[in-house]
Amino acid sequence: MLGSGGGSGSCSKDMAVELGDEPHVLVVDDSLIDRKLVERLLKNSSCKVTTAENALRAVEYLRLGNDTLEGTVSEVNMIITDYCMPGMTGYELLKKIKESSVLKEVPVIIMSSENIPTRISQCLEEGAKMFMLKPLKLSDVKQLKWHLMKCRN
């Protein structure tokens, strides 16, 4: 399920324009609880949030791999993805994003409940801006907001 939120209910493209300067974050996680937690923290920090329950849904939303449509969702300012998901991992999603001519500059944050140094360095080498341990906290979101503001200026 792909979810989008800017208030209550889902956001249409017209509504996204009305939201003005709210940064738009795509959150990808197969855990509903973790997805909702990150969504709540980001919304409380004045972000527009779209959620996807796996990396394949995120690929569909971002229109990755479809040359004619790629880039039509360029209003995403940051992507936060879980590392370990069925079907396609967050690491594989990161690689796809970094291969995209349109999305490669969008900061990608990888989160995981496992603190595995080789995994962390692999993600950072591939282009992830940060690697965060779950569950995310308000202090983590403040760091994310700093990255968002830095990337938007």
Image: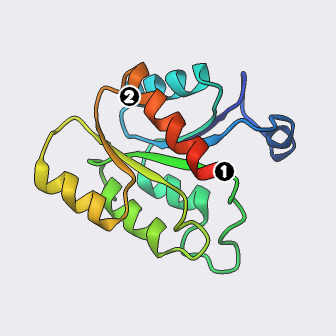
Q: Assign a secondary structure to mark 1.
A: loop
Kindly identify the amino acid type of the residue bearing the numbered disc 2.
Asp
Estimate the x, y position of residue 86 in percent, counting from the top left.
30, 51
Image point (52%, 68%), residue name: 104
Image point (67%, 68%), residue name: 71
Kindly identify the amino acid type of the residue bearing the numbered disc 1.
Asn
Give me the disc on residue 34: 2
Can you identify the residue that label 1 sits on? 153
Label whose residue precedes the other's in the sequence (2 or 1): 2
Estimate the x, y position of residue 144 in percent, counting from the top left.
47, 37
Disc 2 to disc 1: CB gap under 8 Å = no
Q: Specify whether 120 is left or right of 57.
A: left
The one nearer the camera, 54 or 26, is 26
Circle 1 crowding by C-alpha within 10 Å: few under 14, some 14–19, many from 20: few
The one nearer the camera, 74 or 33, is 74
Image point (27%, 65%), residue name: 125
Q: Specify whether 144 is left or right of 114.
A: right
Q: Assign a secondary structure to mark 2.
A: helix
Using the numbered discs, state the Cα–Cα distance from disc 2 to disc 1 in whole angstroms.
29 Å
Q: Quadrant of residue 133?
A: top left
- Looking at the image, residue 26 lies above or below residue 63: above
User: Total number of numbered labels?
Assistant: 2
